[in-house]
Amino acid sequence: MVEYIKCLFVLLLAVSAIKCENCVTYDFETNFDDSFNHGNSLCEGMASWQLGNYSSIGLHSPNKETDLFITPDENLSCVSSYGFEMKSTGVVEVYVYMESTSQRDQIVVLANEVSSSGNNVVTGTTMLTPLSTNYFNGWHVLRINLFGTGIFSGYVTFLGVASPGSKVIIDSFRYIPPLYEDDCHVYDGDFVTSSPVEPEPTESEECVAYNFESDFEELFDSDRGLCTGFSRWKLDQYTSLPIDHTSSESLQFISPQEFISCISSFPFEASNGGVVEVNVYIQSAVPNDQITVLVNKIVDEASDVVIGSAGVSPLSSNYAEGWQVLRIVLSASGTFNGYISFLGSASPKSIVLVDSFRYIPSELTAEECKIYDDEVIEVTTPVPITTVAPIGTGEECVTYNFETNFENSFDTDNVLCNGYSSWHLGDYYSLAIDTIDPNSKTFIAPNETSSCISSFVFRMMPGGVVEVNTFMKSASNLDYIIVLAKKVVPSGDDTVAGFQLYYASNDHFVEGWNKLKVTITDNSIFDGYITLLGSTAEESIVLIDSFSYTPPNYADTCEIY
């Protein structure tokens, strides 16, 4: 292992801390058993990676200094590194070799941050399988551009499978801090291979294709953003269902619980104009069955923004049972790190599932980004075009309470609300709470099942703020309110220009009146509306009294009453 003298390493019980920001390199010549472990929560229950020798497998070592590498078992294997200091926008590079005999072969690399609360947060991921775009047998450099904020303590985790007869190898890795100008080599000499080392391209994006055949528990969680506090989706097999597969290669899927469930994917790099496609199946026995897909842009460690959504349920105006492809065109500036969240519910007699998904960069075609070699899904869900005339110019205040004209001003006809029950009107006389204003007599409230409703169309500007006055007295951790500011896209999918979530299980939850603020993040003036999602237990009080839109730099107070 190469150690640079600018850094001081303290190795204690397989934990290494870096006392300065610098290059970190590691090969597997020394201290593998002390520096790596598979006893953490992520690797629990899995086989470990094992040391191997190049001389024993007939493969030339990439450098005269090394003869050792690590390789996984034929079952899913996992190992995590010692801890070291990293910084957002830094880069992790892993030198790997794959000579595959099976599509099960894989290497997955996770860069993890240990947050101040002690939880582990994935700050970047990359993978290599025979199904990867432009895959070839030989040497590869897997590259992760770290996101997050500031300097943090972290580690890397390797997951992998090596089928009998395959060569699946990690030779070494390195961490390069941002703006690091000195040499950062794993070995003093050259990295020499029998085939060219081809790093993942940094100029153009790659296709991201995922099915649920492996690594579900490791790559998906319910601990971030929207999904926090909800029950997870569950992994199951098609042998339990009387339906045709999407592909002979597809054996597993995920499905929601009877009550609203939520789970989020691993992060991946995406950009404006890219497309997310999700292959879903629904055969419903009750109207409340549903699947909603949200694409999230990661802003920083603590906040995310929804930039696209799609959904299907029996209440959709264009609902058809069977296979569907939910398609979301991304609208956000530049290149960013993001992830996908799946919300859904399924009654015991229904079939509601997600088989797979893919992200297709704008410069690639669907044919260049296959999930399966023999995929046959053809059904798509059309998106209606919104043609409602907007209110205002975006430069004046817009206010609304629910005292008048609710039925004509709000509806459930848009794509996102299809499949949800509607919010209903209520009056404060039936509740033992103080109103937000003496002139306020009426509110709207969700039902015990997830409810959705969208407002009239009004014009919004970048930097404007939507404020929603809410009251919550919760008897259930599943009580929640979601506010989405939506941009009307006449020729495609309406996009999300701002987002706020409030729920009872949040650490910062305060019972009573609260003002949910959504800052408009789009970069142009647009016609839009707000969508309200929510749920309430029978013993809880969850309501919305009113909302306002305040333009940027608006000098006056935006009074609702």
Image (tube, grey):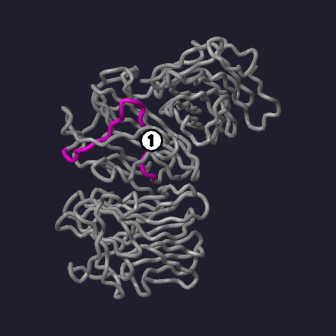
- The answer to whether residue 486 shows anywhere in this view is no
Residue 551 visible in rendering = yes
65 or 156: nearer the eye? 156
Q: Which residue lies furthest to the right in this view?
A: 555
391, 439: nearer the viewer: 439
- Location of residue 157 in the rendering, given as x and y in whole percent from the top left corner: 40, 64
Q: Quadrant of residue 525?
A: top right
Q: Residues within 10 Å of mark 1 (few under 14, many from 20)?
A: many
Above/below status of 487 relative to 200: above
Q: Quadrant of the C terminus?
A: top right
Q: Residue 532: x, y in percent?
A: 56, 27
Q: In this view, does 109 lie to the left or right of 395?
A: left
Q: Which of 286 and 354 is in front in this view?
A: 286
Where in the figure is residue 278, as x and y percent of width and height? 36, 40
Q: Which residue is drawn at 56% across and 80% down?
A: 7
Q: Nearer the viewer, residue 63 or 200?
A: 63
Can you say whether 412 is above or below 110 in the image?
Answer: above
Q: Examine the rendered structure and indicate whether residue 70 appears above or below residue 332.
A: below
Q: Which residue is tagged 1? A: 341
What secondary structure characterizes most of the magenta part? loop
Q: What residue type is labelled 1?
A: Ser
Number of labelled discs? 1
Residue placed at 59% from the left, 37% from the top? 500
Please tell me which residue is depicted at 36% across the width and 26% down the height of the picture: 289
Region rendered in magenta: 248-267
Q: Position of residue 11 (x, y in %)?
A: 49, 77
